[in-house]
């Protein structure tokens, strides 16, 4: 599903209005009608409405809402934050129509006097917000919040005022918290990237009649991976498949004290549907890593300590019988590990997932990833991404979508940037936001399961972009199923294995 930002949405509007001659007031009428319907749905019996209008087209939508509600015989007040003379042309036209229908504007500082059963409609700023709201705008946002605390429901028109439609971050202190948001034409990035969802409440996307030809003229910058799209990435199993054809995964993982990381990666690969899964690790690691996982096979790596040049031969031998590699969860890492892994990738010539300590091992030389020439899927959490890019974690989190897309292109790899709203970006094309998952998954080992799951999908023949998207979607959904039964607090990485199977069962895969 297309996920637009503010500039992209404006470009689509322009393509419809200037390019195809759709009257802008027609779009505004449809936008206002969708918002008015939503406002009615939020109101209690006999509830009153207060519409707070800004000076741009978001305010124009608000005037349409007020006129339609008055026309439906409801009690409506409008608080206008901008003088009529300074409204956008379309907002001025809609204000005039509303006033002709008997709606009167009240002063910017008029109290909202809304309580239980009542609805406040936030039509202050939409995609045109360009800086932090201050003065009368900030004061109006505070009054909306006070009304919500007093029991009124809040409907945001298009985007909660104060929230960036691009990043999901409030631009300043004042930012509306809505019970519902009706957004127009396309889902907005800021409504799905955190903390946007907490401000937006329940989001619905209203069709306002922008022709698909107009939208097609503007390149898509991002997408939201919805369930049907995720499911379509994973083909049903071939009825005649035997285990050698279902995908063979070599997992390189585990060290003393981190045997569980290997165990969980194996679990992810097995539940991900791989036909054969083998663990390559130091001999001392194998008994614990394989305990309770009789489906997995093993290849003991001679020697001891960090993975280094001497391990290349045994690893290549094990890789000869694999279709994909999963490298990293809990590997023993030393100075030579990064060089060994880059060499292994090139020489094995297999698609590979790099996770955790494999990412840390290549951190100083990430620019060499592209030269390996193999299909790569990197699964960093924000801290690992920061080390790979030489940034702080805060810098990574500021623009997750943009950074993942730039780095995917630089490394010629698919990047799965984990965290609240995992992002999957390919070397080219729009990155995807994954809507599944919950805060309970911020617990040790969940990433190891994801790495294994993605490895199984790669081994089954999916390209890294498809494996990363489907893997992250299914992993998040599995986490949501576990959280429903055991709570977010009770969720363990080990629970995800069986729950991945439940997602496959839902999908008949
Ligand atoms: N998507 C569509 O097809 C349609 C969307 N519509 C609605 O129009 C808004 C976008 O309208 P726009 O006039 O571009 O911007 P805003 O109303 O969001 O902004 C208003 C105005 O305010 C100025 N401004 C920005 N930030 C601040 C600030 N912090 N303090 C003071 N003033 C600020 C800015 O310069 C603008 O002039 C979209 O969200 C939809 O709701 C239409 O209905 C048509 C169809
Ligand atoms: K708004």
Image (cartoon, rainbow, N blue to C red):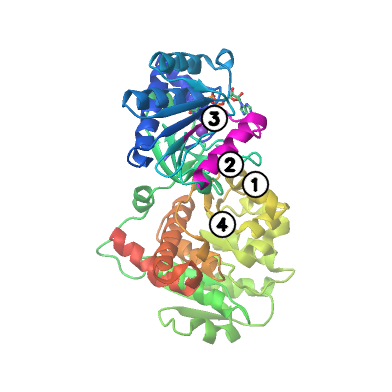
Q: Nearer the viewer, residue 237 or 93?
A: 93
SS label for mark 3: loop
Residue at the disc numbered 2? 167
| Side of 247 where 367 appears, left or right | right
The tag on residue 419 is: 4
Which quadrant of the view contains residue 165? top right
Real-space Cα separation, disc 3 to disc 4, in angstroms: 31 Å
Residue 124's tag is 3
Mark 4 → mark 2, Cα distance in angstroms? 15 Å
The answer as to whether callout 1 falls within 8 Å of ligand 1 is: no
Q: In terms of depth relative to the viewer, which is nearer, 458 or 219?
A: 219
Decide which of tag 4 and tag 1 comes sooner along the chain.
Answer: 1
Counting residues from the N terminus, which is met first, the one under dot 4 or under dot 2?
2
Q: Are marks 1 and 3 in contact (CB under 8 Å)?
A: no
Magenta segment: 121-149
Q: Select label 1 or label 3 by which is in front.
A: 3
Q: CA distance from mark 2 to mark 1?
A: 8 Å
Q: Nearer the viewer, mark 4 or mark 2?
A: 2
Of the two numbered discs 1 and 3 on the same chain, state the one appearing first in sequence.
3
Secondary structure state at the residue bearing disc 2:
loop
């Amino acid at each position: 599903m297309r996920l637009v930002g503010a500039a992209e949405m404006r470009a689509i509007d322009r393509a419809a209005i200037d390019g195809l001659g759709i009257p802008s007031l027609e779009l505004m009428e449809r936008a206002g009608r969708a918002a008015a319907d939503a406002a009615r749905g939020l109101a209690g019996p006999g509830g009153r409405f207060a519409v707070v209008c800004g000076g741009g087209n978001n305010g124009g939508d608000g005037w349409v809402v007020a006129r339609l509600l008055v026309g439906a015989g409801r009690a409506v007040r409008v608080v206008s934050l901008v003088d009529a003379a300074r409204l956008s042309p379309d907002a001025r036209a809609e204000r005039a129509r509303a006033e002709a229908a008997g709606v009167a504007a009240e002063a910017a500082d008029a109290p909202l006097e809304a309580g239980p059963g009542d609805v406040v409609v936030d039509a202050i700023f939409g995609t045109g917000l360009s800086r932090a709201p201050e003065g009368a705008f900030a004061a109006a946002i505070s009054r909306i919040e006070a009304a919500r605390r007093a029991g009124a429901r809040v409907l945001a028109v298009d985007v909660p005022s104060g929230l960036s439609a691009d990043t999901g971050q409030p631009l300043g202190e004042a930012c509306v918290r809505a019970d519902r948001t009706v957004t127009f034409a396309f889902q907005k990035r800021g409504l799905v990237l955190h903390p946007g969802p907490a401000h937006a409440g329940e989001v619905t996307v209203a069709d306002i009649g922008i022709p698909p030809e107009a939208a097609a003229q503007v390149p898509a910058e991002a997408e939201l991976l919805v369930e049907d799209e995720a499911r379509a990435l994973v083909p049903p199993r071939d009825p005649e498949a035997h285990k050698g054809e279902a995908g063979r995964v070599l997992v390189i993982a585990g060290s003393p004290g981190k045997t569980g990381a290997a165990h969980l990666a194996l679990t992810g690969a097995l539940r991900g549907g791989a036909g054969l899964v083998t663990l390559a690790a130091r001999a001392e690691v194998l008994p614990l890593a394989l305990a309770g996982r009789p489906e997995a096979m093993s290849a003991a790596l001679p020697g001891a300590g960090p993975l280094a040049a001497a391990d290349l031969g045994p690893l290549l031998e094990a890789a000869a019988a694999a279709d994909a590699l999963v490298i990293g969860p809990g590997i023993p890492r030393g100075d030579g590990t990064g060089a060994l892994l880059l060499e292994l990738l090139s020489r094995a010539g297999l698609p590979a997932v790099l996770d955790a300590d494999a990412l840390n091992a290549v951190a100083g030389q990430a620019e060499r990833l592209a030269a390996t020439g193999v299909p790569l899927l990197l699964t960093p959490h924000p801290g690992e991404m920061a080390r790979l890019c030489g940034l702080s974690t805060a810098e990574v989190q500021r623009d997750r979508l943009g950074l993942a897309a730039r780095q995917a292109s630089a490394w010629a790899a698919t990047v799965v940037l984990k965290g609240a709203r995992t992002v999957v970006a390919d070397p080219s094309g729009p990155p995807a936001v994954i809507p599944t998952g919950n805060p309970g998954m911020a617990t040790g080992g969940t990433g190891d399961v994801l790495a294994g799951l993605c490895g199984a999908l790669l081994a089954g023949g999916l390209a890294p972009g498809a494996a990363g998207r489907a893997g992250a979607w299914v992993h998040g959904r599995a986490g949501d199923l576990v959280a429903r039964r055991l709570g977010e607090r009770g969720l363990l990485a080990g629970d995800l294995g069986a729950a991945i199977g439940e997602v496959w069962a839902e999908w008949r895969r």
